[in-house]
Structures are given as structure tokens and as C-alpha cells.
Amino acid sequence: MPPEAKALLRTSGINAGYGTMQVLWGVDLDVRAGETVLLLGANGAGKTTFLKTLVGLIEARNGSIVLADEDVTRTRSSDRMRRGMTYMSELAVFPDLSIEENILIGAQALGHARPQSRLEELYGLFPVLRDKRRDAASSLSGGQRKMLGIAKALAADPKLLVMDEPSAGLSPLFVKEVLRILGSLRERGLALLIAEQNIGFLEVATRVFVLEGGRIRFSGTVAEMADNEALRRAYFGLK
Ligand SMILES: Nc1ncnc2c1ncn2[C@@H]1O[C@H](COP(=O)(O)OP(=O)(O)OP(=O)(O)O)[C@@H](O)[C@H]1O
């Protein structure tokens, strides 16, 4: 993708925090249409705080967030969702409803024109959810619930899916399955922004941002990251 390609999402100089504690310091990040961007950083680096600021769950103290050419810095979370940015969270799953009801809620939230056909598409991507579609979401395993969280977020047909540590708590086999699904979403042209500590996700990334102490320490392609000796040592454990 040419570097001058237009950004779907661009943040400039984002400062955010909790009470008197500032966590993010001037974070600049961009995601182009159809791109998979990985946000790497150690525990406490500020990844979750950044993603929540992005989707409107935490208010930015300074800076701007532009989504599809609109400044959304001061808009509600639901407005950002209508503009095509969805936050994946397995916490958004309703445990007492069936798997199918959960997905349909995700589709209807944004008035999807053909929720039934969207459902079939999603079952194609997540066969395990089709098999269990009439069961309560509470009967799913942790990994399957994560799949349902992704399916529910996708039901709204976003342009950009924002995910916070999709690998957390998953067995290596499930991590592989999540990577397979993300790869096929990428092929369908969906842009992804993924905060992770698991460098296995570099496999699906086009570009990487590294957050340290609430500041962007590096941004570039995966190959550029591998060329950086300090990052190679920190993230790949190599000399
Ligand atoms: N609700 C909160 N109130 C006060 N401080 C918070 C809150 N949430 C996070 N923090 C602090 O903000 C800093 C950044 O946390 P954040 O969760 O954004 O990091 P992270 O990179 O996502 O880490 P992890 O990988 O462990 O989830 C940490 O010092 C954390 O203690």
C-alpha cells in the first residue's frame, strides 16, 4: 500500500489518563483502509487506555481523532460505531441470550439491512457458532465466547474493527484459529487495529506501532521493526 494512501483513522497528539494520572502522551497513530495495524506494548504501556479513548469510552484530554474524514474526538461512542468503527469485547456478549440472538443484536444495533444474510456469512467464518446457534451464550467456553464477541462486532459490518488482546486467555490452538479468522477478514478488506503482546500477530500485520510508557516509540512495517536491534531484542528475544 503506498505510504500516501489516505487514512481511515488518524489520531494526533492524544493525551488521556485517569484523574491526576496521565497515561497517554501525544499519541499519533493511523490506520489506512483495509490495513491490519498491530499496537504492541508491555503490560501497563497504555494500550487499553488508547483503544478506549479511540472508541469513545475515555475522553481524550488533548489531540484529535479523525475517522473517515470526520473529527469524532468529542462524539459519543455510538456515533463512532455508526461511522464504521467497532470495538470487539467478549464482555459485550449477553450470556442469557442464544448465540444467534447475540449476533442479530449486533446486526440490528446499526440497522443492518439484511441481518439474516449477514448471519449466514458469519457462520461461514465461525462454524463452531453455527453448531451451537440455539444454545445460550453462557454455555460457551472462554475461547468460543471470544469468537462470539468477534462475530457480534462484525455483524454491524464495520470498516474498522478495534480489538484489545484477542489472544488473552486463549490456548495456542485457539490463538491459531483467531489468526486464521483475522487473516480472512483482512482478505475481505476490513481494517483491523489490534493491541497485543503476542508477537504471533505480526504474521497478520501490515504495520506496527510500539507503545512504551504511554508514548509511541516506533512505527513502521514488520520488516522495519525486525531491522531495529533494540525492538528485535525486546520483542523477539533475539540478538
Ligand atoms: N481505570 C483506571 N484507573 C486508574 N488507572 C488505570 C485505570 N486503568 C488503567 N490504569 C493505569 O493506566 C496505565 C495503563 O494501563 P492500560 O490498561 O492502558 O495498559 P495496557 O498496555 O493495556 O496494559 P495490559 O497489557 O496489562 O492490559 C497503567 O498504569 C494502569 O495502572
Image (cartoon, grey):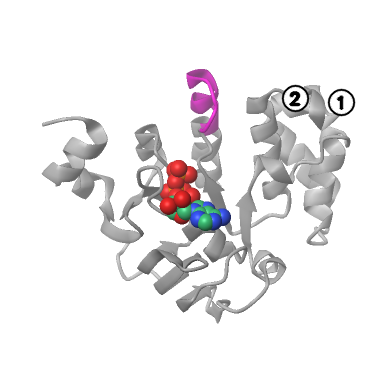
Please name whichever residue, 21 or 71, is drawn nearer the observer in this view of the structure: 21
Main SS of the magenta part reads helix
Mark 2: is the Cβ under 8 angstroms from ligand 1?
Answer: no
Image disc number at residue 93:
none
Please name whichever residue, 110 or 124, is drawn nearer the observer in this view of the structure: 110
For the magenta stretch, what is the residue range? 168-178
Q: Is 15 drawn above or below residue 174 in the view shown?
A: below
Horizontal and vertical percent position of residue 39: 39, 50
Q: How far apart are marks 1 and 2 (CA)?
A: 8 Å
Query: Of the residues under marks 1 and 2, which one precedes in the sequence?
Result: 1
- Judge left or right: residue 138 versus residue 8: right
Instruction: Say which residue label 1 marks.
Output: 135
Horizontal and vertical percent position of residue 156: 72, 54
Which quadrant holds the N terminus? bottom left
- Judge left or right: residue 201 versus residue 82: left
Tag 1: amino acid: Asp
Mark 1–mark 2 contact, CB under 8 Å? yes
- Judge left or right: residue 161 versus residue 120: left
Which quadrant holds the C terminus? top left
Residue at 55% x, 23% y is 174
Q: Is 152 drawn above or below residue 26 in the view shown?
A: above
Horizontal and vertical percent position of residue 52: 56, 59
